[in-house]
Amino acid sequence: MNAPYKSDLDRLQAAFDVQRAAFSLDNVPGISARRMKLRDLVRAIRARRSEIVAAVSADFGNRSADETLSAEIAVTIGSIEHTCRHLDRWANPTRMFNLGIPIPGRTYVRHEPKGVVGVISPWNYPFQLAVIPAATALAGGNKVMIKPSEFTPRMAELLARLFADVYGEDEVAVVTGGPEVGKAFSELPFDHLFFTGSTAVGRKVAMAAAENLTPVTLELGGKSPCVMMPDADPEKHAPLVAFGKFYSGGQTCVAPDYLLVPKGRAEAFAEAIIAAARRAHPAPATDQGYTSIITERHYQRLAAMIEEAKASGLTVLSAGEADAASRRVPPTVVIGPSPDSRLMSEEIFGPILPILEYEDLDHAVRFITARDHPLALYAFGRDARAAENLVARTTSGGAVVNGTIIQLAVEHLPFGGVGKSGYGAYHGRRGFAEFTHARSVLVLPQWPILRDTIARPGGRRMRWLTDWMIGK
């Protein structure tokens, strides 16, 4: 192991040891203290908003300031404020009024912190996807360690400064480093591990955590389908698809990954989507409001997909020219790629939208359900009930009718995947539950008759209780 890695790994272990030693159920901060610090964190975020915008843009090469302000800062603040408003109700013990058996007593559920929580955050939304799970875990009374992506080093440094504004190192620690540090991070005996990223890496994280029996939340990706119902309108619905697909240069885990349209309508929807993209981004190669692809490797992968589609004789429509220097790939649609092509077998994670036609809705459902369960599914149509029926016939982490990607901002909806798009969920109350242990407590009265009944399992009273439960 070379010296830099050893130094990074030493710092990682030291940070974990500090938090492990600091955690005790005897000194978990009270609900009011947790809420006060979360509100201090919101104030710190507001104070550093320009720094956050600049750090994200510098890491990407260019990232739309509007996208960072809305999807990173506003959504994160909204999440924390939602937690603060509801924290008393979530965190206080929950009384259970019915024991379900004819034995006297009272029951309740304590919502206790798990301990030290690890958060591995990705590069595509490097602020939101680090801060929201961390803040939710802190709301539960946990200690938190964050490992940001090595692709966003400026944001990683800013996250460390931001949390240091409010929390001590024994409460929140941000650790940096490359894949070697990420591997070691996932192997630590956390009390809960939260990972957002690719399915391939998520599988490795889950396997590493399994060695310690660490519970894991995996927020992965997959190929999220978008379906135009037979009554969908290109002029009305295509702009909403374009928004979700090309937002942040297509680098969103819940972006539509392919579009299914009724037979004979692919060209009309393709032209409407590109027209909408041109209205939003008239010059994507130079527009500061259009986000760059994160790295040269990712840019070249997307460029190769487009070239393969052209070489196959497919219809390819673009809303502008690519710019290799700034790593900008223009909004692009490809009509009719083969199901076994790279466009249809890999998660695209960029501003390229394949469009395929279906014969009828049964065909569309079969096409979707024959593939791995996606993180999201979108359905568009004038008849919203019919679109909801299509949603009910498929499986996905979440779904939206007549919209795309904005489910991320609806804080009371659980957000999570299913199958290869992940497991576990967070946001709102579901997130609080993910990072806490629901500990059941039963308190029995000290009645002699109850003590005698329990102590004599072969006695008359216990036989009567058993018969009652069986239903004799």
Image: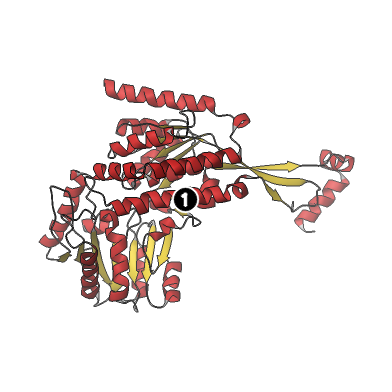
Q: Residue at x 18, y 44 (%)?
A: 296
Q: Can you say whether 322 is above or below 459 in the image?
A: below
For this rendering, which residue is in front, 420 or 444? 444
Q: Quadrant of the C terminus?
A: bottom right
Task: Give residue 403's quadrant in the image.
Answer: bottom left
Q: Residue 386 appears at what percent x and percent y? A: 43, 76
Q: Amino acid at mark 1?
A: Ser
Q: Circle 1: is it few (<14), some (14-19), or many (20+) Cα within 10 Å?
A: many
In this figure, which residue is indicated by the disc labeled 1?
Answer: 79
Q: Quadrant of the N terminus?
A: top left
Horizontal side of residue 427 vs 347, given as left or right: right
Q: Residue furthest front?
A: 47
Horizontal side of residue 276 vs 98, given as left or right: left
Task: Give residue 7's quadrant in the image.
Answer: top left
For this rendering, which residue is in front, 25 or 468? 25
| Circle 1 SS class | helix
Q: Residue at x 44, y 49 (%)?
A: 77
Is residue 338 visible in the rendered image? The answer is yes
Q: Residue 257 appears at what percent x and percent y? A: 29, 59
Q: Residue at x 39, y 52 (%)?
A: 421
Q: How many marks?
A: 1
Q: Residue furthest top?
A: 3
Q: Residue 188 appears at what percent x and percent y? A: 43, 30
Horizontal side of residue 426 vs 24, given as left or right: left
